[in-house]
Image (tube, rainbow, N blue to C red):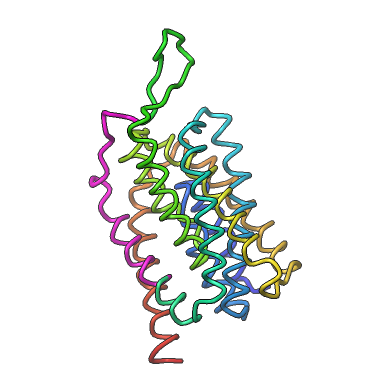
Amino acid sequence: MSLLAIAAGLATGLMLGLFGSGGSIITLPALMYLLGVEAKPAIAMSLGIVAITASISAVTHWRRGNVNVPVAAIFGLFGVAGTYGGARLGVMTPELVQLLLFAAIMYAAAWRMTRPGAVVPRTDTLVRLDCSGAATMLCFDASRVGQVAAHGIVVGVVTGMVGVGGGFLIVPALVLLSGLPMKQAVGTSLVIVSAKSAAGFAGYLGAVAIDYALMGTFTAIAVVGSILGAAASRRMSADGLKTGFAVFLAVVASYIVYRETIGG
């Protein structure tokens, strides 16, 4: 494995640990363009790598109280269903369509990450504390459960089709739809991303060839990065890193578009 591929694995984990998102956006191009994996196997392996890495990082956030279980359950349950369906659809979708859609999502993520003030928590949260007098009890606003479930399905389908965990879509959705504080949105996103990515990986099993040795090595490197990212998230301002990551996304998306169209 090249030094660039190792750096990509570390970056995958760092992004997941810091932001609860961004893992597959780095993993998929690294597998394809640095390690020479074909598109569909790379999409499947990317989902598997992110599933394991996000799960480990989620444990760290869980211990800090940054995982909202009811929201993760609703969003994650419907997201898993959407991801599995998206993966089955992805098996039948032309590779060029998958990759161009992936690049479009990267552009959207870059734009979103340069607008940190655009996400404002709602006051009518999906989950409210102390609904029946017990300080630790969580209850649901049933009128908005369907809204969160629908968003989970949509993000899940995109996840399965193009091999992205969807965290950069989930985090702002959790803040906007569920009224979660940013740190809780990151931790909750990791739980959802791990479940949806695992479902997407399962959807590709038996349909594409997977290099498990390469996948395991990349995952091990990414896990190290996720531990470092989760530790840094406690004391690091992410604004500068978000801007740099947004530029990185735009550059990689442009390379994919060029490689798959003009330069192909």
Query: How many numbered marks have been drawn onto this rendered protein structure?
Result: 0
138 up-or-down from 22: above or below? above
| Residue visible at 59% across and 64% down in the picture | 46
| Residue visible at 36% across and 27% down in the picture | 141
Dividing the picture into quadrants, the one containing residue 7 is bottom right
Dividing the picture into quadrants, the one containing residue 250 is bottom left
**Coordinates of residue 88 in the picture (x, y in percent):** 57, 67
SS assignment for the magenta stretch, majority: helix
Give the left or right position of residue 202, taking residue 149 as reference.
right
| Residue visible at 39% across and 81% down in the picture | 257
Report the quarter where the N terminus lies: bottom right
| Residue visible at 57% across and 41% down in the picture | 58
Q: Which residues are magenta?
A: 102-125
**Coordinates of residue 59 in the picture (x, y in percent):** 61, 37
**Coordinates of residue 51 in the picture (x, y in percent):** 61, 53
Tell whether position 16 is magenta: no
